[in-house]
Amino acid sequence: MKAIVVGISGVTNGGKTTLAKNLQKQLPNCSIISQDDYFKPESEIKTNENGFLQYDELEALNMETLTSAVYSWMKNPKNSIESDDLESAEEIPILIIEGFLLYNYKPLDTVWNRRYFLTIPYEECKQRRSTRVYEPPDPPGYFDGYVWPMYLKHREEIEYHTRNIVCLDGTKSEEDLFSQVYNDLIEERAKQKCLQLTPEVPSCSTSRIL
């Protein structure tokens, strides 16, 4: 069965998890893989010259394990169906992968049907981050001295090397963000159904590019 793989990435505290969960509630036959579940233990996280734990880097994540989970789902997506609704079970499966550092990892480049990237301004991001509780907690100066500079670095990398990423304004309401992405994925699902019936029809995209 054809499956749709969707990435929701972007800045810390930009609303990635909330958006993914809202979509899963409304999209039949939809699963989520969260990148946060693949962090290495704190004992394996390196520190930089300022003594900050380097969590915001690919080396802090078990990306090979995450990639294996993605390909395992793609091979047999029906394993993730939890609904008894037979009509929903017949829908093309959707996998949402949400995380802050998805598009900088080249082995995942070929899996995406849709890629979204949430952004919020510096001040908004810093304020949101200050209200979150992390384990281990953010030390003083961690946001300005490490988190935000790493976000800018990783975003610059994908701006130069990655195409077909749809930018989302994370300052919009949850409802507006949900509506934008939900409608896009309904369109993508309909397109994939059409391609299954008439594979000679060329695909097209009208998404705004990063």
Image (tube, helix red, strand yellow):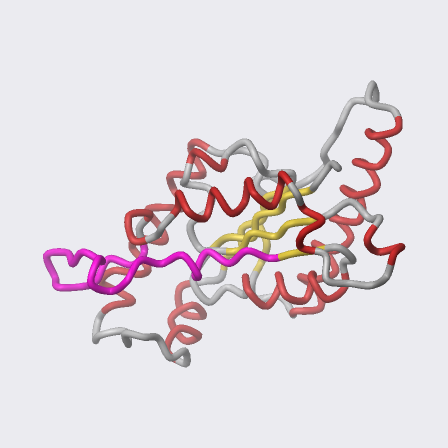
What secondary structure do most residues of the magenta stretch adopt?
Answer: loop
- Give the image location of residue 43, x and y in percent: 20, 63
Relative to 26, residue 164 above or below: above
- Give the image location of residue 110, x and y in percent: 55, 31
* Residue name at image x 68 percent, y 66 percent: 22
Relative to 203, residue 152 above or below: below
Nearest the viewer among 129 and 26 is: 26
41 sits left or right of 19 in the view = left
Q: Tell me the magenta residue range.
A: 32-56
Residue 196 falls in image quadrant: top right
Nearest the viewer among 84 and 18 is: 84
The reply to whether the magenta stretch includes residue 199 is no
Residue that extends furthest to the top in the rendered view of this protein: 200
The reply to whether the magenta stretch includes residue 45 is yes
* Residue name at image x 65 percent, y 56 percent: 31
* Residue name at image x 39 percent, y 46 percent: 63
Q: Quadrant of the C terminus?
A: top right
Residue 177 falls in image quadrant: bottom right
Nearest the viewer among 121 and 151 is: 151
Residue 42 falls in image quadrant: bottom left
- Give the image location of residue 81, x and y in percent: 72, 56
